[in-house]
Amino acid sequence: MELGQLLLNALVLGASYALVALGFVLVLNATAAVNFAHGELVMAGGMLAVALATVLPLGDVVPGLLVLPLVLVVMAGAGLLFSLVAYFPLRRGPPVSVFISTIAVGIMLQHAVKAAMGPAERAAPPLLAGPQLDLAGLIVSRQALATLAVAALLIGGTALLLRRTQFGRRLRASAQDPEMARAVGVPVRAMIASSFALGTALAGAAGLLFANSYFVSPESGGNLMIKAYIAVVIGGWGSVPGALAGALLIALFEVGVAAWLSSPVAEAALYGALLLTLVLRPQGLFGEPVGRRV
Amino acid sequence: MSAARLRAMRDMTPRSWLRPAAWAVAALALAVYAFAFADSYVLRVLTLTGCYAILVMGYQFVFGHLGALSLAQGTFFGVGAYTAALLGLKAGTPYLLNIAAAIVVTVALAALIAVPVRRLKSHYFALATLGIAEVVLIGARNWVDLTGGGDGLSGVPGMALFGVSVPRGWGEFAVVWGAAGLLALLARRLQRGLPMRVHVLAREDPIAAAAAGIDTDRLRFNAFLWSAAYGAVAGALAVPVVRVISPEVVEFKVMVACLAMTVVGGRTAIAGAFIGALLLYPLPEWFRFLEDHYLIAYGAVLLAAVVLAPDGLAGLLGRLLPKSPVRPTVPDPPDDISLAPASTSVDLAIETVGKRFGGLTALADVSLRVAPGEIVGLIGPNGAGKTTLANIVTGQYAADAGQVSLGGLALTGLAAFRIARAGIARTFQTPALAPGLSALDNVATACATPGRGGPEARLARAYDRAIAAMAETGVLDHAHVDVGALPHAVRRRVELARALALRPRFIILDEPAAGLTAEEIEGLAATLRGLARTGIGFLIIDHDMGFLMPLANRLACLHEGRLIAEGPSDAVSNDPAVVEAYLGPDFHVTGAG
């Protein structure tokens, strides 16, 4: 039964990581640049949820589910603002400039949140309040189930948006080949801005889930960004399903090794596994080898 | 090279006294301020600022000059600091020995990392170095027996040189800034002359750099080790000033500080390292009213710098203190340098080459020979595989089947830069030149000059060969013009000169006539004919039959990855398969010269 419990924990953690990685890879594909502040955006979403839960006039304990739509909307707006500050001024520059500008905005975000809410770890109220369920000996909190359900809904919704709508097709077209997309009349700038909005909204949702199940502090951002970055690398650069699978794999790895040995060992081993992946399969675990255009 | 010739080369890039004077004034001002006005606290801040200037100089090697975003520079600082501190604390070894050990340990760590990760492209390199930084941080926090864990260890011994302890305050200040000055001179020596120019090409266009015979992997490897060595010295100098060692020195904020100083000060100018460190290290003091929140200002300064001053403050200053204008004159081409191939006895042989991209067959069973002095035209519709073939011959792609050889030397599987050095040069569909460099500097990047002499002598030898090559392709008049300001036709000829400067046996040209006027095309054909007479063989991809028909000795036609015809130009252009696949029934060469 212990194995089942471990798997469930890994699945819940993996679902949250997957949301982080999804937002990360959407922005990555739209801009061909790494958003180093993505973890800080996740953290900001979590802190926003904490703040909203205390401010909203909905009684003593506001269920996280009611806060979620607000977090999505506010963070989408924050994503637009973020793109205006950190991406669009440097769009024509080398990708490394965007790397640096997002590091800069990440620092500002981290310390602005610290200034506003203090350095301590915070927790948001659970998505759904209520006692734990006992499913054939497996202790399942309502929170865990709600986390899985919310993550699945958001990921499924994003997939539908990307695959089935005209907006999604345009988004993917401008990510794949901006020149060609522009030539056939896709407003590429608007699509990039939308990718930031969507990716940041998902980051916010991920932050809310983390703030419910675990804790967030102003310092949690960097670690989350690295997890998303690793998920994208082992899943194959730019592949959305690969990023999701990579996130689940990271969670399994972390929970498994931490249970077996210890948390620091799990983290060090994760980086070791990452380096091995980079050396042996730079195209990612699931990716096709990609050639560079000359 | 004669002394007069060397002098003529140096005359092209005269030095102004303005910059050395500015350095002297700045150094004097800092010294006067430190000794006359600074109290012990300010002295300590200034001393640590010097350590960061050294850290940033190291980072410029890998990030500034080669554009590789390493996120391990802060870790090198920390590993150097830990090594020196632990030796001083636990073994009581002399301070200078501790510094040396810090360098050895850190450089060894960097080499260990660099072997697997140096080939990785930008985003992977950044993540890999970040991963290593995280592993070191986890180690520092959790290996309590060695590092003292999260609390760290106090009581690190102070500096002592040859058994004499260095006074706190001004003594440490003098040691650190003295070291910074020496290391600045060393960095200048390592970068000036030809390396600085080669680095621009390696950074801006690694593929073109490989085609010019430059081993970009080795450059990155060396730069990474130098950055580690500088980082180690910075850490080993800082730790006896602070007297405490804790995981703080390997936290990511050291890396962020270093990155910010490099971007704000300037990515390649050595002055930028000093400006960035002097401006940003004391920033918490300047923004003391913000208390712990000064890092918000830090982020804002970094963002402003990357958006508004991509060359950093040193770049802005450099415009105020220009190097003396380059003399417009260029020495005559040297008469003792021949660009003809050393031997003209072997063919370039392509044998049954095949290449697939996923499910797409780009090339299948292609065989083609080019003899010395021969001009072979490669034609075919778009997507036929012409450029893919060029990329396989020059090593940008690996063939799935078949082989390419030069006499007895198998080229298949060799790195692109080795193929270039073996005597196969190329140009690209769009001229691939290093922006911001003059035409002469661009051509000189292909003139690796092993041998004796300082940076200036080596640059002079490279210029000599570059001038000879530029004279051959008729662009010597544009030698000092930034390539960004040159018209398209001239850029093509500058690129051809760079190919020629490799002293190749064969040159592969990818659509050299595209975008040229009829007159320019005729001139180009004449130049190529002249070069072929010296023994260089050419494989020329082009669509302009009016250019190729009279120029080429033979034509070969690719269609859907297969060679459908090969032979004398007339025979190929009348071949029914070629007419059907490419030329069309109405094809006639008109106006052929």
Image: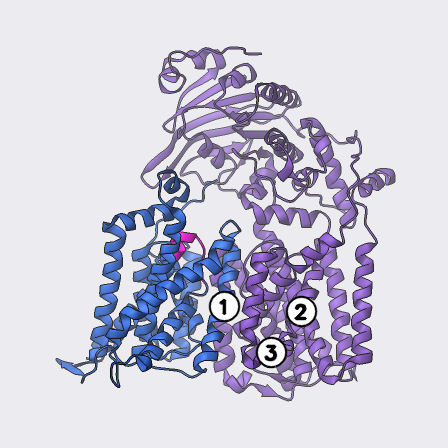
Chain colours: A blue, B purple
Where is mark 2, residue-wise? Answer: B279
Instruction: Out of B553 and B272, give the one closest to the viewer.
Output: B272
Report, in whole angstroms, how far the alpha carbon at label 1 lies from the one at label 2: 29 Å
Q: Amino acid at mark 2?
A: Leu
Relative to A58, A261 lies left or right: right
Comes first in the chain, label 1 or label 2: 1
Report, in whole angstroms, how far the alpha carbon at label 1 lies from the one at label 3: 16 Å
Residue B453's place in the image compared with B238, above or below, is above
Nearer the observer: mark 1 or 2; the answer is 2
Query: Was residue A31 drawn as part of the magenta stretch in this picture?
Result: yes
Relative to B571, A152 lies left or right: left
Q: Residue at x 34, y 58 (%)?
A: A235
Quadrant that contains the N terminus of chain B: top right
Q: Which residues are magenta?
A: A27-35
Q: Chain letter of disc 1?
A: B
- Furthest residue in direction front, as rendered: A57
Quadrant that contains the C terminus of chain B: top right
Disc 3, disc 2: CB below 8 Å? no
| Residues at marks 1 and 3 on the same chain | yes
Query: Was residue B375 drawn as part of the magenta stretch in this picture?
Result: no
Secondary structure beneath label 2 = helix
- Tag 1: Cα neighbours inside 10 Å, few (<14), some, or many (≥20)? many
Residue B5's place in the image compared with A49, above or below, is above
| Residues at marks 1 and 2 on the same chain | yes
Report, in whole angstroms, how far the alpha carbon at label 3 lies from the one at label 2: 26 Å
Q: Amino acid at mark 3?
A: Tyr
Relative image position of residue B343 (x, y in whole percent): 65, 28
